Image (cartoon, coloured by chain):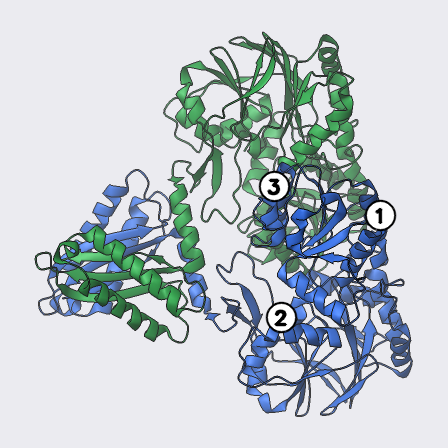
Chain colours: A green, B blue
Amino acid sequence: MNMLALRCGDDILVIDAGVLFPGSELLGVDVVVPDITYLLDNREHVRGLIVTHCHEDHMGAVPYVLSQLNVPIYTAGFTQAMIGRRLQEYDLEEPPTIHEVKPKDRVTLGCFTVEFIHVTHSTLDTLALAIETPLGVVVHTSDFKIDPTPVDSKLFDLHTFAEYGKRGVLLLMSDSTNVDREGFTQSERAVRPALEDIFTRSKAGLFFTCFASASHRVQQIIDMSMQHGRRVALIGRSLITASELAHEMGFLNVPDGTLIRPQDLDRMRSSDCTVIISGSQGEPLSSLSQAAVGKQRFATIEPGDTVVLSARLIPGNEKRVYRMIDHLYRRGATVLYGNRTPPLHVSGHGSRGELQLMLNLLRPRYLVPLHGEYRQLHQHAALAEPMRAAGVKESFILQSGDVLEFGEHGVRRLDPVPVGRVCIDAGTGDEIVEEMVIRDRRHISEHGVIVPIIALNSHTGELESGPEIITRGFVVGEDGAELIEGARAVIIKTLEGSSGEEKTDGSVMEEKIRNDLRRYLTRVTSRQSRPLILPVILET
Amino acid sequence: MNMLALRCGDDILVIDAGVLFPGSELLGVDVVVPDITYLLDNREHVRGLIVTHCHEDHMGAVPYVLSQLNVPIYTAGFTQAMIGRRLQEYDLEEPPTIHEVKPKDRVTLGCFTVEFIHVTHSTLDTLALAIETPLGVVVHTSDFKIDPTPVDSKLFDLHTFAEYGKRGVLLLMSDSTNVDREGFTQSERAVRPALEDIFTRSKAGLFFTCFASASHRVQQIIDMSMQHGRRVALIGRSLITASELAHEMGFLNVPDGTLIRPQDLDRMRSSDCTVIISGSQGEPLSSLSQAAVGKQRFATIEPGDTVVLSARLIPGNEKRVYRMIDHLYRRGATVLYGNRTPPLHVSGHGSRGELQLMLNLLRPRYLVPLHGEYRQLHQHAALAEPMRAAGVKESFILQSGDVLEFGEHGVRRLDPVPVGRVCIDAGTGDEIVEEMVIRDRRHISEHGVIVPIIALNSHTGELESGPEIITRGFVVGEDGAELIEGARAVIIKTLEGSSGEEKTDGSVMEEKIRNDLRRYLTRVTSRQSRPLILPVILET
């Protein structure tokens, strides 16, 4: 859920607007976006939003931000196209302004002048930023690795970084994702030997899954398919969208006659086709998960076929991915996955070697590690320690909402600004789930709910009907009927012990019933039974 | 959740009774045990339950089984002690019978004669089984690796396996956990270099976490602490229980004066102590998780301290473990975790090399891979393929409930027997959560609940009060009040459209209201809003 704001006087520049895919603790929430209260409170000062690349954790919240704040966007061509495609699903009040920028372009936004720098990463058209400010240059690396042999032969722009380093950099903000890996991340081309091996051995169907926007990977699978006389089908909406755009824009090299439609697969021999299919994280409704249980319309996996998971397994997704792999084995497929030599997947993020090289190239006065959990930010800061004598004066670990102020006389932390998460329930992007709703769901999901209901005469306060008690998701066990009977008795006793005045005040009675029932449940159940208690008092 | 039954005529022998720790999809369920309907239906034939070792996935369901079926248990001394300690928490109707057995002991149970064989594993006193049956010998490896240099110098009993192999084995049932790892698993002693390095460098507090029953690991940490002049505190109930028992029984070598009580830690300099603390899986209430947020009574983690995760990260626990690590970093600790060289942890399960060696030693006619998910069982079966000419005729992958029959003339699969899972809600082991309760919890947790309530006059069927509508965990959005108002109108319309006869039949009215409300919600909410609808009709 990356988002960062630079402010200088009355000019605010925002970098990235990403989403977070929620864990199971956020029940029923589809996606989480950043709380942009600070930007809305300062909306007249926001000069622009730069999106560094098209990954969801950098780009996914753009529709949400635009729905609140019509800010001009600056981004590379491929990211622009991906945002454009995404915005088709939304009905924004004002048309968005998206400026395409290219590496080496310079854009002035208020007192900031931004130069865009080409870096290598696992997706297309990723841009780092060198931002000139009145106090000095701020460099934002975006996500990067230094790939010496990128698939598209567009080299990482070491020279521009070197020049900025020579001229002097105030602050480096740099990717920390792989700080716990020694050495240098392998080139994207490092997956080629494994692909060659797989294509050479396979005599039946071949299925690859990777991230939808991993166009370099898709290119390599297509290249290898051509060499081995296989035609290629793409299955999965996001994969098709990204690949179509990449092809239209000349990033993806697909000779005519290479691609076939998914619906043509059943007319072909499986040994003549390669299928690239989305769902590397075992998402339950993804095409590969569906194919694994024989429910994908076009992709049929048969005994002897090979399925290759050419993607990182994102922490938290292990169980569902392994469940999918088990299903694939049950269908008789051979599944290739995990860390193997030669690799089936290489990361798009630089390891310690690259992070150190970036520090060496830029020699910044200050470092703010970006893009990682606390342990990774901490390790990145520690990596810069030995460079103190070389001029890297200090590192700052910033957590969400933290504010760091650079002035003529140095750096200091200011009070945090309000930030947080906004939980979105549906793909439409306009249904916000309150944290309280999630808390309730969580409580009910763990302990169940018990709803005691009584009807009181509004004049006399006498019990007209009930108590009725309904429960859901609440373990009553073998003594269930007895327990419910006891709860009824408790409520009747609560009523008897209440004055006429109390009985005509619904909220007082609700609270009394809730307390008495809670005490009763704690007493009679062996464990701490804590269902959500929702008393209802009807007045007749 | 390991459990296996061998049956020969009217004699049933059960091997292991383990639990499963449920994923987040089983909301509020603490532990899952096997459904033992088959054993209960055949209770007069069950001759004994053998528990191979003390890990929860082999031993944890013993109290549950004993509460249903008073079967004699046969197990090694340490496992017996662990079971005994566990049973103190339960109030069984009949006293259990637990026979201690030693390696090389032979026990006859009906037509089975079982010889117990010592194997090396990550916990103490693990036993494999060679079971003589009228049709031939069945070997059950239990969990094992072949550790050539075990910490306690009790070698893996290769010779007994070799002898059985020489005499001929009908069926091998063998551990499949690490079938996806090449070569041989490293010896438990392989963690020593990393420990030496950690103890040599550390000038402040040292915290280790490992599985409670990993007594070999505890031994090595204690040994190293003695060498470096540190005294040792154990924190965490299960860790203390297992270590106390291991010490009492002579498995754990702890010189007098080595151990200190947790409450004495604050009087000592942190550089004079080692703390072994439970919670390697980031369990929210574990001692280490509590210490990570400064809430453990005795373990205080301070800047400069080192925390070592000396355990496997079980798939599914990644997120909470990483969250704990982040907290530890925030407290200023250095955290050592993950796959490192030299290793901080080695597995207790054999890799492909050991599995092949086992197949070579025993040369069984049939193989049933045990202990793994489907992909692992499949890979284990594939590993035996090249041994066909050497006499391993066939492998069978069995899933829960599958039945394999060996007869004079070969092997065949029979119809499965009823099996499944029983969900237990509390540590007391006697509260069973119905699958329906879990389904309800799941539904509510994802979509919320809506409870429409009306009071009807039981004679006239007229509306006396309501409709009241309460919702929880249900997203009503900005138009919430309007939506609820609309729902009230729907219910009133439902009532108006119902005959007097219908109105005096609560269940009919409930169903009508549920259907009409469901249709209304689908219509007015942009997404498929599917809260659990629980109509309540009070009769006054």
Rounded to the nearest angstrom, the CA distance separating label 2 from label 1 is 34 Å
Residue B327, label in figure: 3
- Tell me whether circle 2 and circle 3 mark residues in contact (CB < 8 Å): no
Q: Nearer the viewer, mark 2 or mark 1?
A: 1
The disc labelled 2 sits on which kind of residue? Answer: Gly
Q: Is residue A143 above or below residue B407?
A: above
Q: Specify the subunit that label 1 lies on.
A: B
Instruction: Determine the residue positioned at 44% across, 52% down.
Output: A442
Nearest the eye: A434 or A412: A412
Residue B128, given in percent of the width and then of the height, sits at: 78, 75
Rounded to the nearest angstrom, the CA distance separating label 1 from label 3 is 26 Å
Residue B361, given in percent of the width and then of the height, sits at: 89, 73
State which tag comes first along the sequence, 2 or 1: 2
The disc labelled 1 sits on which kind of residue? Answer: Glu
Q: Nearer the viewer, mark 2 or mark 3?
A: 3
Nearest the eye: B71 or B362: B71
Q: Determine which residue is flagged by label 1.
A: B196
Q: Determine which residue is flagged by label 2.
A: B60
The disc labelled 3 sits on which kind of residue? Answer: His
Instruction: Determine the residue positioned at 69% across, 42% down.
Output: A231
Q: Specify the subunit that label 2 lies on.
A: B
